[in-house]
Image (tube, helix red, strand yellow):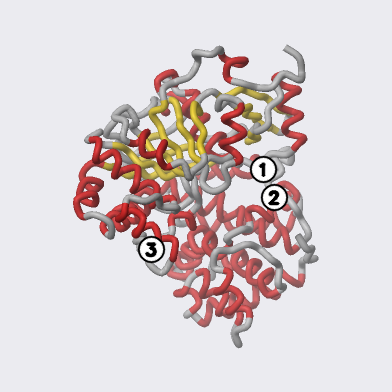
Amino acid sequence: MTASTPLTREAAFGAEFAAPPRIVHIGLGAFHRAHQAWYTARAADASQWGIAAFTGRSPRAAEELTAQGGVYTLIERAADGDSAEVMPSIVEAHDGANLDRLRELLAAPKTAIVTLTVTETAYRVGADGSPNLDDPAVTRDIDALRSGGDPESVLGRLVSGLAARKAADAGGIAVVSCDNIPDNGALVRAGTLGLAEHVDATLHAWIAAHVSFVSTSVDRITPRTTDADRQTAEQLTGWRDACPVVTEPFSDWVLSGEFPAGRPAWETAGARFVDDIEPFERRKLWLLNGAHSLLAYTGLLRGHRTVADAMADSECRAWVRELWDEDVRHLPASLDLDSYRAQLEERFDNARIAHHLAQIGLEGSTKLGVRVAPVITAERAAGRSGAASIRAIAAWVALQLDGLDIHDANAADIVRARRSPDPVRALLAVVDGDLARNDDVVAAVTRAKEHVHSVSTHAAV
């Protein structure tokens, strides 16, 4: 083997080393490969559980992985150095538009699980989890599903696959959302059943009776791969890998729900199965994700590029700690919150993981609505100001009023809000309507916006 040898499954593991595909994944990307695929590869019964993965939009990831037989290098980037491992758990990689193969896999009785990492907006549902019938993609999918055509949305494709499973009488299956959404299992269940209800009453009834929807809390920082990372993979393994993944040493996965057709022994790789996932979701959404949003918007205002850069700023670090002080007042002490905070601070300080604030800041109106707004509401209900949490939203408002271009699915509402006679209130309404109707909160956001702007040096991204 030389340094120029391309990575392939046969070269790394031998031609016969591939588990049967029993998990279908929708949303093939770096996070899936650093998280669910990593847990599957490390499970005690990994040889029984291969993953057939489908991309969400671009087919590029599938093309790169297919050329390598599905294998890739996972680089764990600690503060004191890198380590690498070739991961074998993805045994097929497909363009998400390949619905023939998706339906074939879901119709197979041996297929037991569908996992998803597609982001909240890709589910195309309303606040109550029902399909957004104002979305043209949703109405097109309903027509396609009724006529036996190929839907385009994530839930449309899932319903198409479940219809094939019903027709094949292949039995129950678990659907596992691994997106950062509170009660993600219930949201995907509502969206899937709602879509099926518009298509076929018997399909709706079959899904309700035979498909479980598992809720999860997932956590592993996974930045975008660079050319330098590809060079690192080759240096550490001797293989030339077109699509390595870089991640931090820390990982966490908490799941709650039933698996009617079985599952890997993910607990042997460190996953936890619990009856009540809600406290774990809140801990992660508020402390990790909430702090990320705070750092993204205050950090960008102060001219920083990465999480580690912002944490090296004593002002930003103090703001994070103040945010956490508010968060933990509304979480059960049984979650070992002091230890969790210490772990987070260590992770944020890892400057070798280039977690870019501009990337974290995407889709801010939706993220702030679940990561920060609930804590403001809880703090004020307890007679406190919620100032630390308000600061996170105020920094986002400041960036929006500065005209910084941060991609957001609610961009049209944000543009209208900027032009409003009361832009702070209007922008706050995009995040949380109840908070925007509270004059005291609007005044507090206005003051915090002015303060954070006055102590910051805004740098364009």
Q: Position of residue 364 (x, y in %)?
A: 58, 62
Please tell me the numbered disc located at residue 356: 2
Q: In the image, 61: left or right of 194?
A: right
Q: Which numbered circle lies on residue 87?
A: none
The first of marks 2 and 3 along the sequence is 3
> For the point 59% across and 67% down, which residue is it?
393
Q: Is residue 14 above or below residue 205?
A: above
Q: Residue at image x 56%, y 36%?
A: 62
Which of the two residues, 373 or 179, is positioned nearer the viewer here?
A: 179
SS under mark 2: loop
Residue occupying image coordinates x 48% and y 55%: 122
Q: Which mark is residue 224?
A: 1
Q: Amino acid at mark 2?
A: His
Whether pointer 2 and pointer 3 mark residues with C-beta atoms closer than 8 Å, the reply is no
Which quadrant: the C terminus? bottom right
Residue 290: % across, % down: 56, 55
Q: Is residue 407 left or right of residue 215?
A: right
Quarter in which the N terminus is drawn = top right
Relative placement, left or right, of 307 versus 328 is right
Q: Amino acid at mark 1?
A: Arg
Of the two numbered discs 1 and 2 in the rendering, the one whose residue sits closer to the viewer: 1
When the figure is inspected, residue 366 is found, relative to residue 436, above or below; the finding is above
Amino acid at pointer 3: Thr
Residue 219, horizontal then vertical, whole percent: 53, 41
Instruction: Measure how far apart labels 1 and 2 are at the Cα level.
Output: 9 Å
Looking at the picture, tell me which residue is in the foreground, 93 or 357: 93
- Where disc 1 sits, the SS reads loop
Circles 1 and 2, Cβ within 8 Å, touching? The answer is yes
Residue sitting at x 61%, y 28%: 67
- Tell me the residue that label 3 is attached to: 139
Q: Is residue 334 visible?
A: no
Q: Residue 114 location in percent, x, y?
A: 39, 38
